[in-house]
Amino acid sequence: MEPYRPRRSVLYVPASSDKALAKIAQLSCDAIIVDLEDAVAPADKVAARQKLAGIVANRPVANHFGHHCEMVVRINALASEWGADDLLAAANCEPDGILLPKVDTPRDLLEAGDVLDDNFAPDSVKLWAMIETPKALLNIGAIAELGRDPASRLTCFVAGTNDLANDTGVLATPDRRYLVPWLMQMVLAARAGGLDMLDGVFNDFRDLEALARECTEAAAMGFDGKTLIHPAQIEAANRAFVPSTETIAGARLVKDAFALAENAGKGVIALNGRMVERLHLAQAEKLLAKAAAIGA
Ligand code: COA
Ligand code: MG
């Protein structure tokens, strides 16, 4: 089994903000996305790119909890005037991953992958993809399928809910009712491709209660974590994307039951009046590994 890598809380930090960058060593998020795209004004793009090497070289090895903190660089769209240079600059600093915005087709990822292949082994720098355009949603199965081929480097999808609402014209409501069908589509595709799936950002960063509700909802929808815009949002995400004490206890029961000599070799057993199959054992083992990795 692949070791579980927590991506519960993934914070965008604008590459142009020294004040925000100075904070990152003290944060308790699972990953940081250094942003060259939407958080950086056009006039600051080149200067932000020039700072990238220093930012990545000085990245914290571990977060506040002593866990490995991934660092990912979000570049500008490859079709934009900055994209190609951003990709080279990002690749040269060898971050854990490069997040491509505005991915429309598998080809967008394959092209970026080719550039990385010129310099790095396939198990090094990974690719993450923003799912934020109508085209990406229409092509999502084919895009996700790349996740089954390690040579593609694709490892994670990030929902771009602000762009999606903007491009489609749906109303952004507090319950996200018009976005939910697309978000579920993303979760389904990510599972089909063996990818992690991160939810979009919550813009109202002073309303931590509403954020906590949205994180709980996202965890129930199957998301692995949430992308964030402000340090104050980290705690709610870390709390929501952890299995509950009851869920962990239930998983232990399933594991212990299958370990009994009388159940050896059985495909299905009865546990407290419920049917439990080997698929539940696999699910329980995965959940316990996840809980152990984050110290839950
Ligand atoms: N990462 C790291 N530190 C951050 C941060 C972030 N994303 N957002 C805010 N901070 C820091 C601030 O620099 C400030 O530091 P200080 O205590 O040294 O002054 C502290 O946290 C408190 O910030 P606050 O005053 O509450 O917010 P702000 O007005 O400075 O910033 C935003 C608000 C929204 C502009 C800022 O949070 C931000 O830029 N977020 C990221 C936006 C982004 O990346 N968008 C693109 C992806 S959707
Ligand atoms: Mg976007």
Image (spheres, rainbow, N blue to C red):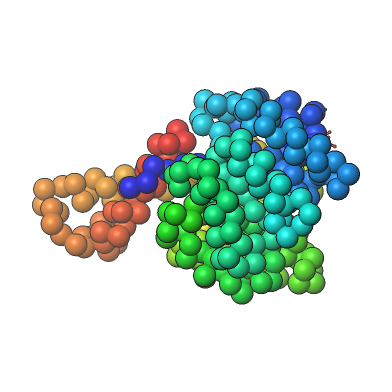
Q: Position of residue 72 (x, y in %)?
A: 61, 41
Left/right placement of residue 293 relative to residue 223 reads: left
Q: Is residue 103 above or below residue 95?
A: below
Of 242 and 69, the residue lying toward us:
69
Q: Quadrant of residue 7?
A: top right
Query: Residue sitting at 88 percent across and 44 percent down?
Result: 43
Of 205 and 107, the residue lying toward us:
107
Q: How many marks?
A: 0
Quarter of the picture containing the C terminus is: top left
Left/right placement of residue 117 relative to residue 36 reads: left
Q: Is residue 259 above or below residue 140?
A: above
Q: Position of residue 32 (x, y in %)?
A: 63, 38
Left/right placement of residue 159 relative to residue 20 reads: left
Q: Position of residue 8 (x, y in %)?
A: 56, 44
Quick one: which residue is furthest to the front in this view? 118
The reply to whether residue 119 is in sight is yes
Query: Residue sitting at 65 percent across and 44 percent down?
Result: 88
The reply to whether residue 229 is in sight is no
Query: Residue sitting at 58 percent across and 59 percent down?
Result: 111
Quick one: which residue is furthest to the left in this view? 262
Q: Is residue 71 above or below residue 254?
A: above
Quick one: which residue is furthest to the right in this view? 43
Query: Residue sitting at 21 percent across and 51 percent down?
Result: 258
Q: Position of residue 65 (x, y in %)?
A: 54, 27
